[in-house]
Image (tube, grey):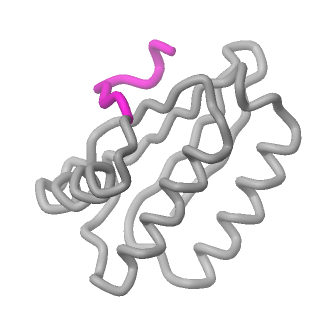
Amino acid sequence: MYKVEVNNAKKVLFITVGGFFQEEDGKNFLNDYNNAVKSITPSSFTLALESSELSTSKAEMIPILENCIKMYKATGFKNIVSTPPSSAIAAMQLKRVLSSLNVDIEFISDLSKL
């Protein structure tokens, strides 16, 4: 499950992710993400990831998670913030991926304050 929403007034691209991603979900997400990014100037926007409902990823899905993080970084957002996954294992997976990619994401508890 995912949702991509542009808030031009706040200059925030909100992405909600949760549950398990299958390959088809990934393809649809990339299409929606790219369309949203084309409609904004990323360097003046914050990317806000609502990932509290993100589930633990299977080992074969970790490279896809890594590629998403790389894509977020390469897009050139002003900054990237995220809610931490509520699952301790999913949170550890995400932090491990971020560390291995040397990507800094600020974790905050409430995205509505952006």
Q: Position of residue 72 (x, y in %)?
A: 57, 47
* In this view, 34 is above or below 111: below
The residue sitting at 30% across, 73% down in the picture is 57
Q: Position of residue 15 (x, y in %)?
A: 56, 44
* In this view, 64 is above or below 84: below
Residue furthest left in the image: 88
Count of marks overlaid on the render: 0
Magenta stretch: includes residue 74 = no
The residue sitting at 37% across, 54% down in the picture is 101
Q: Position of residue 51 (x, y in %)?
A: 38, 47
Q: Position of residue 58 (x, y in %)?
A: 29, 81
Question: Camera-side residue: 82 or 42?
Answer: 42
Image-based side of 105 in relation to 31, left or right: left
* In this view, 50 is above or below 2: above
The residue sitting at 55% across, 58% down in the picture is 2
* In this view, 34 is above or below 41: below
Q: Which residues are magenta?
A: 105-114
The residue sitting at 53% across, 60% down in the picture is 68
Q: Which of the 4 quarters of the picture holds residue 14?
A: top right
Residue furthest right in the image: 39
Q: Which of the 4 quarters of the picture holds residue 56?
A: bottom left
